[in-house]
Image (spheres, grey):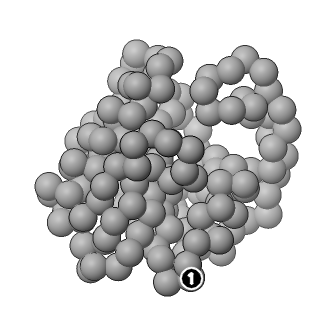
Amino acid sequence: MLMIYTKKVLSRIDDVHKWEQAVILFLNTFDNWDLQWCGGGFEHYDAVGRTPKGKECVIEMKFRTKYYEDKLLEKYKYDQLMDMPYDMVKLYFVNDPKGNYLFWLNEIKMPEPVNMWCPDTTLWTKKKITKPCYLLQENLATYITLNE
């Protein structure tokens, strides 16, 4: 997969939307996915469509400017994804300076959530609150590409 990480701080939501659309274009073009971008609304996912095997799916995406060994997923976002129809594939894509990781959430036994200090919204506020989060180990990802 192409290297998505940039040293420029992702400070504007428009930049993140461009990265989301780039991932979708890449997966559709090179891996035979059929995804549509959700338009940057307030859904709990960033893309919807079908996997290469034709299964309905949704993808939540995160673009991190710092590398962390464990990939953070807010419990609230996970719960919103898992409340969707049972047979829909729920995916979590993370990009960071080290690589790209795709987690098939339906197939993962989630660890116990831990409380973490997180921004109160995803719009890069300076205000932080405690949120329950899952810390996913990299080896739980089924699709990993490393930037070298």
- Quarter of the image for residue 118 reads top right
Q: Secondary structure at mark 1?
A: loop
Of residue 142 and residue 26, the one placed in the foreground of this image is 26
- The answer to which quarter of the image holds residue 121 is top right
Instruction: Please give the name of the residue rendered at 45% of the width and 63% of the height, measured from the top-left corner.
Output: 58
Q: Position of residue 41 (x, y in %)?
A: 50, 42
**Residue placed furthest toward the bottom:** 87
Q: Is residue 137 left or right of residue 62?
A: right
Up-down relation of residue 103 to residue 145 (above or below): below
Instruction: Name the residue rendered at 28%, 79% in the picture.
Output: 54
Along the horizontal axis of the image, is 29 left or right of 118?
left
Q: Is residue 139 left or right of residue 22?
A: right
Q: Position of residue 96 (x, y in %)?
A: 45, 37
Give the x, y percent position of residue 66: 53, 28
In the picture as drawn, the residue positioned furthest to the left comes out as 29
Is any atom of residue 27 visible in this view? yes
* Screen quadrant of the C terminus: top left
In the foreground, 84 or 112: 84
Q: Which residue is mark 1?
A: 86
Q: Amino acid at mark 1?
A: Tyr
User: Up-down: is 111 above or below 6?
Assistant: below
Name the spot of residue 77 as percent of width and height, x first: 65, 54
Q: Nearer the viewer, residue 69 or 19?
A: 19
- At 31% across and 55% down in the image, what residue appears? 36
